[in-house]
Amino acid sequence: MSFLNRHGPFIRIFTVILLLLLAAGWAIGSGERESEAEVLDTAGWQWAPAASWDEPAPPAEGWSAYSAPVGTEYPFFWLRVPLPGTDWKDPVLFMLHAGGNRVMLDDGKVLFENDPARKGIRVNNGFYWYMAPLPSPVPAQVDILMRNGLYNPAAPELELGEKSSFVSRILFKDLDNVILGLLLIFGGLVSLGLFASQRDRIYLYFSLLAVSGGYGSLAGNQVIGFLWDNPWASSLQETAMPWGTLAVIGALEQVFIGIGGRSVRWMRRFVFVFCVMATIGAVASQQFYTFWISYLYTPVFLAVFVQSYWVIWKAYRTRNDLESIWVMAGFTSLVAIGFVHVIRYWLPPGVYEGWPALRAFLDRLPEDLIYLGLFAFAVCLIRIIIHRYTAMHRQLNEVNRSLERLVEKRTAEIIASNRQLEAANEHLAASQRESAEAMAEALMLEERHRVTGAIHDAVGHTLSAAIIQLEAARRLLPLDRPQAEEKLAASQELARQGLEDIRHSVRLLREDSGHFDLHGALGALIRETEQTTGCIVESRIEALPDSLSAAQKRILFRTLQEGLTNGIKLGSARRFRFQLSAGSGTVRLRLSSDAKLPSSEPGLSLSAVMDRVSRLGGELRLDTTPAGCVLTLSLPA
């Protein structure tokens, strides 16, 4: 494979990115508007030491020719700046690269004062600026009390001009930075949302890269002075570079998984610690911040560059796919511009003394070129994300097609199974018809048995009482004819009652539970038994649930009726105790008597009642003791 065939895609993409960056830098540089202002030459300036910020007026003597910069051994110093005569209507003194300052006239009048350091706020002199209003006509000179830097001496640049001219220049110069920063932050927020939904770390590192670059782009310009008059924003601007470096390492680790391995992980952890320490220094200590940013970031950047480029080159040589080509092209462009940025802002000032042409060349470049390079690299990462998303989309389409084929197969199997089920249902329907016929015959027999049992239960008690009366009449007839006739009359009444019971039983079989008064029927049965047999029945009937069915009511009535009949007929009982109560979802019936039953085995009638109780889910027991017998019924309500 020839060199062009192998490296042609990378060369094309890198060339396009580089040309676009140069074209954007040229457009930005040529579009910057120069203000109609006069740069004040430092040759005529004078300076004098100041005791403190509270010094009320400049000294009368001790002035020296100004030679920038004044050493940091002087925390405060005075500048005497001569001003050219102008007739501007709204003149201002534009001050850049200056910390706190106070502008005064010869008569001691203070024209402008601003000292963020007195509020505990540090100032990044590279971006923070002041516009001190001047009277018109412009005075011959002004005295400026300056606060020097702690570690880097202040080197103020002063311009005199119209206020509107400076405002126009700042807006035209840094508006592209604002737009670029907003685009990066917006892209970072979108990527953060993708990470929250898909948990892919490449979205997280892209979000960190975009947000740090967007913040650096917004804070690293003079427009922010119009939007937010707070030096904190620009003083933290330099922390964006370390965090952006961490984001680049993390993105490479996610794109080229397995390449670099342990060394990339250790580099990422080291840069993370570096970012944390630099951020803490930016908030807590200017000395600590200067140590991490000014002295350590350059070697860290070089180490990260070597490690990252080795990973990218290895991935490019081994894989040579779309992802490695785009990362290689974007990172090469970013590193080239990053080197320019580091050389321009972070090399010690003495480096440029022997090479003044380098400083002149760097000063002609747009200040925001690093952010354009960062944006270009972010575009390359977006291209990779889109490629991965497209690949994932193709995989999902393939999975969907596989699922459709599987669904078609399963549908055919289900149709075949349905046909088999239909045939089985036809056979089952025929069997159900046969079963229904047999069930109908069984139900008819069961109904006959139930009707005969009901009639037996209804009439058995009455006929038993009639037989007792007839037997008594037969014995009394030769001895006491009037009393025998009374017994016969009672037997006749019992026979009529039996006929009425038969009718009543038939009517009960046709009625529902709403027409059956259980309490009334039980009371009538007890009174009738006492009147016809002379027995004593002590009863206690509690309130019962309204949900009792007709079958349950009838079985309670029949149980009492059968218990009284058996006790009188078989056991010659003379005293009964009857209790009916409900609780915990159960109805309980208890009938005790002094009957002496010949056997503890239930008779035919009582066995029929027991069978019906068991069908209703209850239990009926007959217990005999030397003192009598006890009949208990437990029925679920």
Image (spheres, rainbow, N blue to C red):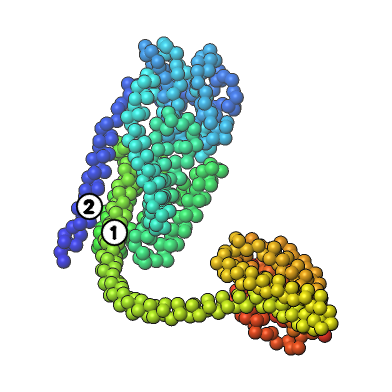
Q: Secondary structure at mark 1?
A: helix
**Horizontal and vertical percent for residue 475?**
80, 84
Q: Nearer the viewer, residue 76 or 393?
A: 393
Q: Is residue 306 left or right of residue 272?
A: left
Q: Is residue 417 above or below residue 212?
A: below
Q: Is residue 342 above or below residue 404?
A: above
Q: Residue at x 42, y 19 (%)?
A: 92
Q: Which residue is mark 1?
A: 393
Quick check: can you spot residue 563? no
Which quadrant of the structure image shows residue 433? bottom left
**Horizontal and vertical percent for residue 499?**
63, 72
Q: Amino acid at mark 2?
A: Ile
Q: Residue at x 27, y 31 (%)?
A: 31
Q: Residue at x 51, y 14 (%)?
A: 106
Q: Which residue is mark 2?
A: 13
The crowding category of the residue bearing disc 2, from other C-alpha atoms within 10 Å (few below 14, some 14 to 19, many at least 20), is some
Q: Residue at x 56, y 75 (%)?
A: 451
Q: Nearer the viewer, residue 376 or 65?
A: 376
The crowding category of the residue bearing disc 1, from other C-alpha atoms within 10 Å (few below 14, some 14 to 19, many at least 20), is few
Q: Nearer the viewer, residue 431 or 185?
A: 431
Q: Is residue 46 left or right of residue 451?
A: left
Q: How many marks?
A: 2
